[in-house]
Image: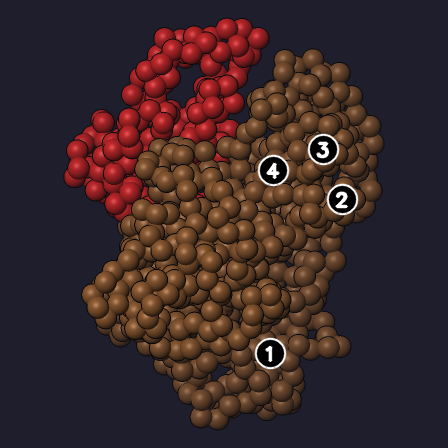
Chain colours: A red, B brown
Amino acid sequence: MANFNISVNGKKHEVDVDPDTPVLWVLRDNLDLVGTKYGCGIAQCGACTVHIDGVAVRSCSIPVASVGKKKITTIEGLSEDGTHPVQEAWKKEDVPQCGYCQAGQIMNAASLLAKNASPSDDEIQEAMNGNICRCATYLKIHAAVKTASSLL
Amino acid sequence: MSLIETKQNRRSFIKVATATGGGFVLGFNWLASCTPDKTIKEIPSEWVDINAFLKIAENGLVTIMSPNPEIGQNVKTAMPMIVAEELDVNWEDVMVEQAPLSKDFSRQVAGGSQSIRSSWKGLRTAGATARQMLVNAAAEQWKMNASDCTTSMGVISNANGEKITYGEIASMAALQAVPEDVKLKEPKNFTIIGTGRGNVDIDKIITGKPLFGLDYKVEGMKYAVALRPPAFGQKLKSFDDTEARNINGVSDVIRYGDKIAVLANSTWAAMKGQKALIAEWEEGEKLENSMDHDHDLHALLYKKSDEPRSNDGNVEKAFTEADKVIEKVYEAPFLPHNTLEPQNFFADVTPEHVRLAGPIQTPAGTRSRIAKLLDRNEDDISLELTRMGGGFGRRLYGDFALDAAEISSLAGVPVKLVYSREDDMTAGIYRPASKYRFKVGFKNGKLTAYHLVGAGVNTGNVTREKNFPAGSVPNYKVESHKLESNITIGAWRAPITNFLACAEQSFVDEVAYEIGMDPVQFRLDLLDEVINNPHGEFGYEPEKMKGVIKLAAEKSNWNHNEEGVFKGFSAYYSHNTYVAEVAKVRLVEGQLKIEKVDCAVDCGILVNPLGAINQIQGGIIDGMGHALYGDLTFKDGKPQSSNFNNYRLIRMIESPEQIDVHFVESDNDPTGLGEPSLPPAGGALANALFAATNIRFYRQPFAKQLVEIEKNI
Ligand code: FES
Ligand code: FES
């Protein structure tokens, strides 16, 4: 075990875990930030998507030891009160079915829109294709990304 | 107004409600304290329990319990909408709580698309009864007849213009006798039912609040990850846990049966512990292979059944007399459910009490199995329902909950058992591999014989003999065979019909093509035969089937050909709902794209159109996705896929670009929605792919064949 100082949602945390522990499990088990989900553990589904320095990454495949001073943002920290345009759009389009994949979808979409405020249909598909929705809410996700883009 | 007879006193009410499975029993703990959700503001601390389904606060807020498990089918929104409708309140004043497993509710199950259908009357009666008690209390206060009072949006008015809110009269209402009969609204007067209402958990979902079983946590709880035999048929011979116990955070290693659980302070440590176990396995039963299943299922298709599931007329004779015979075989592999939230369950087994919590579609059945396993009284066991990250049938089986209870009981600590994705995909319970052989005979252009033989792994009931085209053919025979196996199988979204419909609707399309008929007209003609000249037994309403077929044809412009667009038709009846779909595919840079699906649905009264559209779109994409890519094979008993790197699920790029849903207007009671759009989807796609390529798709997953075709385009 070793001590790591990590910054999550603007707050500093000290955690005592094995260096190979994925950020996902530090968030969920050590910091009780359970909004970030586990789906595959091998960077295939996107359920665990968080931002590191503003960029969407798969937290299941990033060891805590590699984070250093970089800033982690999770779904709980995307906005203070759930009013990030992507969150608003998800609500407006009533996207979720089971809801399990949606935090990852939202984080991925927020990262896309931060880089490209008005993505084309193809760019949305391209950027969101790494996120599986087993309930297949893909059409609503697509519509919500467009709505979010219009709310920016 | 229709009148529901509930002529019984309060005591007998429970018996009657339970016996009829109406999903409504009044609660008796008047004024019991409640635990409102602390995350929502301005929640009053005092509530009045009116019945098991609802409580009302003085400020007019209403809490409605959602009795059934939520797996993404959106009953947590739809069921309270039905109660709120008859209660006659503002939806904005309603808060929803997930009810725990409780004797107050019947059929707390998520399965068979039956949540709304089976509790429709019970939910309405619960709301209407509460409304009547509120009205009776107000009438008593005003010293007038209840029939002279009206309600609207949580306010009771009388002829003198006096008004009182539900909140103000709630505590008096709770003391009222339960009315013997209550009036239900006419559907035309609905103000909540039939209007689109957003998911009640939306704020929690978009801000990442704990909701799911995997999020469940209590002080002192250990995370458990189990190692299971890697192949079906294997048993545990011996194991060495030295390495596992050396892992930081691992606190215990426990063998139970042929499995070994690693307990730890974190999920990651438990997962590492599982990987560090060194186990030796031995062959207990035969280690099976997909190639053998393939061969054996095929042989069964040509075996005569001693007990055909249906046998009208004389098919054998009709085939010898036929002037045209068409025969085809369709095949599909095993499928894992792959709920995105892997299986998990919490259990805390103590001498005093057993506490259970987690994602389960069958809480009551699971509790009684756990009671048996632990030799405990059911009353000592509580079960809390969490929101589920998908169900698709996998969570009908409480195997993981039983395991969690057993581990907690052996370890003496609260435990949350967590499956890794690999555990989830390889631990069993799959859609069974199956095959169908269809054969039809025509005489003078008329369909005279229909013969279907089905065979499935571990399942003897792979046909739906009363479904279309039953009733349209004088000589009709259906047989079903079971191939015994040690691979565990179970219900998978739209059990059996998820592939049977694809096979049947592909066959119907091919037959229509072979006899030179338009596939829509061919279906309509057969249905006319059922209506005008029915043969034998059938279990669907041909008029409703025609209704959706015509609607889908009209909305998709079926009779109008568009350059470069290839269409496929399919229609199916399941879970009491009629669905017809038209898939349109297009060639884009050498690849086939699903451009659009038009879907016509007759599901009775629509409770929540927003949620309904989501279910239907999801079912279609799910059906097409699994028809294209779903494939789980076995080698020496071992599943050959274990995670999303070697098991393909449909993603956004492959999904249809647009799905338009067209509902048939109806005054009939609501029917199923979580499953019925899935069965016809594979057939619509297969038929559209044929239109585009002139090649038939007989074997799932289609993608294997499609890749080859696309190479030559
Ligand atoms: S859990 Fe990280 S990508 Fe699937
Ligand atoms: S909403 Fe269920 S996995 Fe996406």
Residue holding disc 2? B376
Q: Nearer the viewer, residue B264 or B394?
A: B264
Q: Respond yes or no on whether mark 2 lies under 8 Å from ligand 2.
A: no
Pointer 4 residue:
B345
Residue under numbered circle 3: B350
Name the secondary structure under disc 1.
Answer: strand
Q: CA distance from mark 1 to mark 4?
A: 45 Å
In which quadrant will I find the C terminus of chain A? top left
Q: Mark 4 CB in 8 Å range of ligand 2?
A: no
Q: Nearer the viewer, residue B333 or B395?
A: B395
Labels 1 and 4 touching (C-beta < 8 A) = no
- Chain letter for the residue marked with disc 1 in the picture: B
For mark 2, name the chain.
Answer: B
Mark 3 → mark 1, Cα distance in angstroms: 57 Å
- Residue B621 placement (x, y as % from top left): 40, 53
Dot 4 lies on which element?
Answer: strand
Q: Earlier in the sequence, mark 1 or mark 2?
A: 2
Q: Are marks 1 and 4 on the same chain?
A: yes
| Helix, strand or loop status at disc 3 | loop
Q: Amino acid at mark 2?
A: Arg
Q: Is residue B413 left or right of residue B8?
A: right
Residue B205 visible within the image: no
Q: Residue furthest top?
A: A3
Image coords of residue B13 (percent x, y): 57, 67
Q: Which residue is mark 1?
A: B451
Q: Nearer the viewer, residue B298 or B416?
A: B416
